[in-house]
Image (spheres, grey):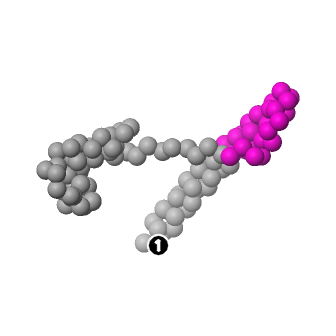
């Protein structure tokens, strides 16, 4: 019985080690690219120190809603409200219904 567990753990470890190795290769390539861009900035005489440029944060779109869909749904719910104040839970519940999610979630 433990042979299956050990086999599964070995396979999972090998998978994760492969992912890490690939990410490290990508990281090395991105660092090299960054070094080349810094050198190009210096070549063109940029007065800005490349290290002072803040990193741009990557935006990850959620898989549940399309671009600006959540904002539009929320505003639709508020537009359809009867004019009385609404609790956040009520707004969220109505957005879930409009989106077609399970109300119990």
Residue with the most extreme top position: 44
- Looking at the image, which is closer to me, 17 or 78? 78
Of 62 and 76, which appears nearest the observer? 76
Q: Is residue 102 above or below residue 49?
A: below
Residue 76 part of the magenta-drawn span: no
Residue 39: x and y in percent read 83, 34
Q: Residues within 10 Å of mark 1 (few under 14, many from 20)?
A: few
Residue at image position (77%, 46%) is: 51
In this rendered view, identify the residue nearer to me: 75 or 38. Answer: 75
Give the residues in magenta.
Answer: 25-54
Badge 1 marks a residue whose secondary structure is helix
Q: Quadrant for the N terminus, please.
A: bottom left
Residue 30 is a magenta residue: yes
Nearest to the observer: residue 14 or residue 49? 49
Q: Is residue 23 left or right of residue 12?
A: right
Residue named by callout 1: 2
- Position of 53 with respect to 105 (left or right) is right
| Residue at image point 44% right, 43% down | 61
Residue 81, position as x, y percentages in the image = 17, 49
- For image coordinates 81% across by 42% down, the residue present is 49
Q: Which residue appears at 25% of the width and 55% of the height?
A: 92
Q: Residue furthest left?
A: 82
């Amino acid at each position: 019985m433990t042979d299956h567990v050990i086999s599964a753990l070995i396979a999972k470890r090998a998978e994760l080690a492969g992912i890490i190795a690939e990410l490290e290769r990508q990281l090395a390539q991105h660092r090299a690219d960054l070094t080349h861009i810094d050198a190009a900035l210096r070549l063109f005489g940029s007065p800005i120190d490349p290290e002072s440029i803040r990193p741009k944060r990557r935006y990850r779109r959620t898989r549940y809603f399309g671009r600006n869909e959540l904002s539009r749904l929320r505003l639709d719910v508020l537009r359809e409200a009867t004019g009385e104040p609404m609790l956040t839970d009520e707004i969220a519940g109505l957005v879930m219904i409009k989106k077609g999610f399970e109300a119990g979630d």
